[in-house]
Amino acid sequence: MTCREAIDVLADYVEGTMPADLAAELERHLAGCDPCRAYLATYRATRALVSAAADVEMPDEMKTRLRRFLAAQLRTS
Amino acid sequence: MTRYSARVYRLAYGITRSAADAEEVVQDVFLQIVNKGAGFEGRAALSSWIYRITTNVSLNKRRGKHRELETSLDELLPTYLPDGHRAGERAFLVADWSGTPESELLSGESRRILEAAIDRLPEHYRAVLVLKDVEELSSDEVAEIVGDSVAAVKTRLHRARMALREQLTRRLGAGA
């Protein structure tokens, strides 16, 4: 397995949807490849960061405006 | 309302990257829910429909806006030598900032770099990224919501993550 082939399949690997034989082949490559190990570690970290950063909450004043908006819509419908 | 408004806002903000646009999307989506009434066969169908309509309304809201911010992903994807090894200086190739505490990466300059990198993703990539990595839907569910194939969803997700990883590593790698 080359670095190109390893990086191509990282998404399936981190999500645990990769067939066991391919995962074993990838892990053999990772064991001997510092750049791909670093790539995998930072790929995983990126995924975790995006998940945390994009977990935004609707501001309270927006919730209030939404309730008022829907109440007004229901009254007129 | 509370059950769905949180996820509608999260997805709308994730795609539009604007609180004002996301608020308009939320109002539009809830108006459609009210008008649609009880025409759903169970909560799963309603949930899937809400994700679909939120994605569509958000993408429409983005149409024609901020295109100048969006960058070509190709220049942010890994490049390779003819033998399949990655091209580039070894110090950059082995740069690993993943040991930095998440709280540190989610604050200050690191947070600004991350937010800017997300801003620069094309909106169709952001939609898949939020549905998959924030809403934690399966690739099959995301494909149904965005109206694309599972293979296309997986490709888009992988490219989006690689582009974000590259931008973070360019800015954080040397100092990590």
Image (cartoon, coloured by chain):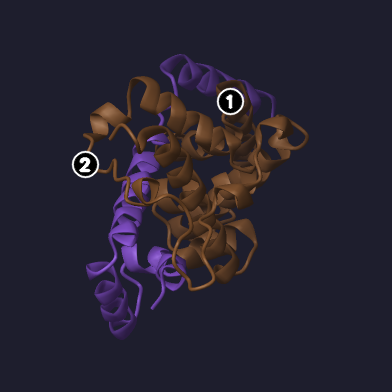
Chain colours: A purple, B brown
User: Residue under circle 1?
Assistant: B18
Q: Which mark is residue A5?
A: none
Relative depth, front residue between B157 and A72: B157
- Residue B133 place in picture, x, y as percent: 41, 50
User: Residue under circle 2?
Assistant: B99
Residue B95, compared with residue B153, is above or below; it is above
Q: Name the side, left or right, on which B21 lies relative to B170.
A: right
Element carrying mark 1 = loop
Query: Residue at horizontal 32%, vertical 45%?
Result: B95
Element carrying mark 2 = loop
Q: Quadrant of residue B62?
A: top right
Please determine if labels 1 and 2 lie on a single subunit: yes
Amino acid type, callout 1: Ser
Q: Name the side, left or right, on which B91 lies relative to A4.
A: left
Is mark 1 in CB contact (under 8 Å) with mark 2?
no
Q: Name the side, left or right, on which B17 lies relative to B84.
A: right
Amino acid type, callout 2: Gly
Q: Is there any visible trace of residue B38 in the rendered image? A: no
Relative depth, front residue between A14 and A38: A38
Query: Residue at horizontal 42%, vertical 65%?
Result: A7
Q: Is there any visible trace of residue A53 in the rendered image? A: yes
